[in-house]
Amino acid sequence: MEKWDDWVELDPQSWPKRVEKHYQLVPTICFNCESACGLLAYVNKATGEIDKFEGNPKHPASRGRLCAKGPATINQIHDPDRILYPMKRSGPRGAGKWTRTSWPEVLQEFGSRIRKAIQQGRGNEVMYHVGRPGHDFIMDRTLQAWGIDGHNSHTNVCSSSARLGYLLWHYADRPSPDHANARFILLLSAHLESGHYFNPHAQRIIEGKMAGAKLAVMDPRLSNTASMADYWLPDRIGGSAGHGENHPR
Ligand code: SF4
């Protein structure tokens, strides 16, 4: 880490000439899924721009490892369609006409519309939709204080069914089991390669396997996860309980 303020790499474009590139490495987080793996932004000291993202080896969960989406974060930085300012529709819906507006104007307009709806008893017309709700619960509490049940997020179609199961089972909706020290690991459906927290979990599941743990995967597909299993239980939806062979390998 003591080298992060002036990280030196050779410019591959200039090879075989040895041209040094100097970077400042700034720790940040990948938010392309909920694993929130640690990234290092390589800030080019000559241009002040981020040239690339790599895994942060000091991050306690991901430990420097990323899936393909982590380094691809650079595409979000340079995306020409990235929305940099609040935009207001200025033509008919679907016409693709937008005008730049300011945050004070946005807050004023939203605030007055919400206020009017509540005052006129139309609270059920107010909905807050967010991609990733996080853990602060501030919006939940605000909406509840207004007497409105209007908090929505993509979680409804993502992790909520799994998390409800966890919550009812052991009162933690996002557990991180100690896979690395387990002796037997049972995964139901997609996990290792595609489920929640798959990067931090997958690397520890493999560590557990390398230390002798047995991995059982219940999944109708021979998924990448199932392909790593000692026991694949390809249950058939709607079939009898005894369908399918277990495949000890
Ligand atoms: S698993 Fe991949 S997409 Fe998810 S946070 Fe880590 S690097 Fe990003």
Image: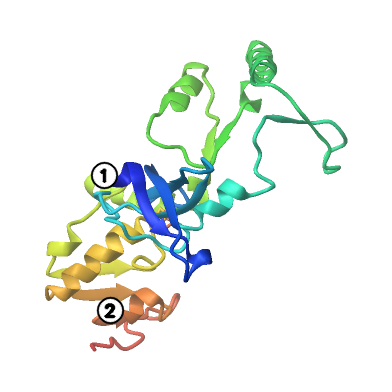
**Camera-nearest residue between 182 and 5:** 5
For residue 172, which numbered disc appears in the image? 1
Residue extending farthest to the top is: 119
Give the side of residue 172 with respect to residue 223, left or right.
left
Can I make out residue 216 in this image? yes
**Camera-nearest residue between 7 and 34:** 7
**Camera-nearest residue between 98 and 217:** 98
Can I make out residue 36 in this image? no
Kind of residue at badge 1: Ala
Q: Is residue 209 above or below residue 170?
A: below
For residue 151, which numbered disc appears in the image? none
Q: Give the image location of residue 46, x and y in percent.
A: 50, 43
Q: Give the image location of residue 213, x and y in percent.
A: 15, 73
Kind of residue at badge 2: Ala
Camera-side mark, 1 or 2: 2
SS at mark 2 in the image: loop
Pick the quarter of the image with the C terminus. bottom left
SS at mark 1 in the image: loop
Q: Are marks 1 and 2 in contact (CB under 8 Å)?
A: no
Q: Give the image location of residue 148, x and y in percent.
A: 54, 23
**Residue drawn at x 46%, y 59% as measured from the top left:** 19
Which image quadrant is residue 222 in?
Answer: bottom left
**Residue drawn at x 57%, y 36% as measured from the top left:** 129
State how far apart marks 1 and 2 are (Cα): 26 Å
Total marks in image? 2
For residue 229, which numbered disc appears in the image? 2
Q: Is residue 204 above or below residue 213?
A: above
> What colour-coding does the image apply?
rainbow
Mark 2, other Cα within 10 Å: few <14 / some 14–19 / many ≥20: many
